[in-house]
Image (cartoon, rainbow, N blue to C red):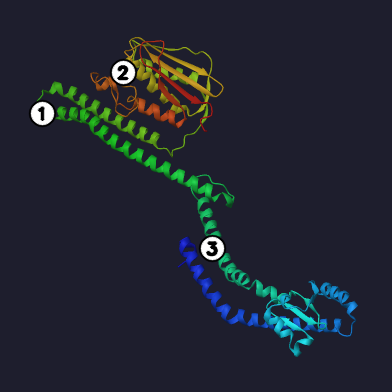
Amino acid sequence: MQISNAKPSTLVLALLLFNITIASLLNTHVYYSLETYVYKQYENFLLQVKEKMHQAFSDVPHNQWQKQAIILGQTFDTECLLIDRMPENFSAENFKLLQLKQAQSGLIDINSAVIYYPLDEHYIAEIGPIAFTNWQTFLLDWFSWLCALIINLPIIYCYLTTIEKHKNNVSAMLQNLPFNVRNDKHSIYENIKELNRVMLKAQQENSERLILQRDLLHGVAHEFRSPMARIQFALEMLEETPENEHERLRHSMHTALEDLDKLVKELLYYAKLKDSEAIISLEKVNLHDTCIAAIAEVKHFYPEVTFNLTTNEAVYLEGNTKLLKRLLINLLRNAGRFASSHCEIALDDTNDSITIIVEDDGMGIPPGKSSRIFEPFTRLDASRSRDSGGCGLGLAIVLSIINKHHGTINLVEGKLSGACFKIVIPQNSAE
């Protein structure tokens, strides 16, 4: 089992069992021996102190006892007291031992670390508790913690090293992903959040693409039906009609084929625009000149409609010239198709955005239908013919071009009676 892949609870349990096992072995084979050795060292030290007491009080007059007691207490950093030789001043066992002859040279109470030295029949010198400190006692006191550190530090180091290695590998892989990440290793969690955001966005885009493909397939099947029916009808009629009618039938088939060709081109163009990964080239576009060029291409389709550009000043925008021209042509063709006699285009330049207004004096958008006009193959007027109604991708292409420029399009109330489209595109479309 790899350490980095184990669950935290499993690691804690394994580490706990390992520590208990090692601690038990060390306590049996090491701690006991060390404790015995330190205990003997302590006993020897107490014997040395008892010897010092014997040297200090032997052959010393009683009026010097207090002075010697103070010196001994300072020497061993404890208290040295002269106490009455009364049973209440000692434990029963110690008082009994002090009555023995061998106790005349001193009595050591190892449990309390106190030494008693009989001075005469009435007084006993008591010194303690006496501290015994050296590196061995320190090692004994901290034995368990030191063992825990020695055992666990290498394990923790290996674990952290493995985690850091995996972290570096993840960071290196993140650097190779097709989106911007920070170069510092400490931002790996921010990079993972960014990766999660990108994956969610990609999932959403894939879902939208599937919906788009489904809608396009339904739309293409519907749109192909009419030209194909015309071709089929013309082919069937060729065998039954006189020679002088063949030219008209061939012309009908050519027209139907041209309609199919236009539809395929529009579909490819629309699919390319809907590709979110496709990057458009940006340049400084003169929208005033682009509007004039778009009007020039559209006005001959609708000779009874007047197209008027109300803005005379040059308006510049950072965008794609071909796409913006296509946007204006599609909007003008849509306006000309439904206008009674007049269409207007207005440009407004602000500090941070460009506003384009396209409106007509036609019948407008039916109530409740404004949300559907940008969907592919949508025709709000079912009575209009295919020739005048286009293939139903014009406004869908407009919306895609605006999205490529990070802009917005909305239906607003205009000065004329028909539909009024308001487009807002930021000055810096690359943002």
| Residue 381 sits above or below residue 54 on the image | above
Amino acid residing under circle 1: Glu
Which residue is at a point 27% across and 36% down the rendered structure image? 217
Give the Cα separation between the discs numbered 2 and 3: 65 Å
Q: Secondary structure at mark 3?
A: helix
Secondary structure beneath disc 1? loop
Disc 1 designates what residue?
A: 239
Tag 3: amino acid: Thr
Query: Could you tell me residue 184's position as x and y percent?
Result: 59, 50
Mark 2 or 3, nearer chain start: 3
| Residue under pointer 3 | 162
Whether residue 241 sits left or right of residue 350 in the image: it is left
The residue carrying mark 2 is 367
The residue type indicated by label 2 comes to Pro
Answer above or below: position of 169 versus 179. Answer: below
Q: Nearer the viewer, mark 2 or mark 1?
A: 2
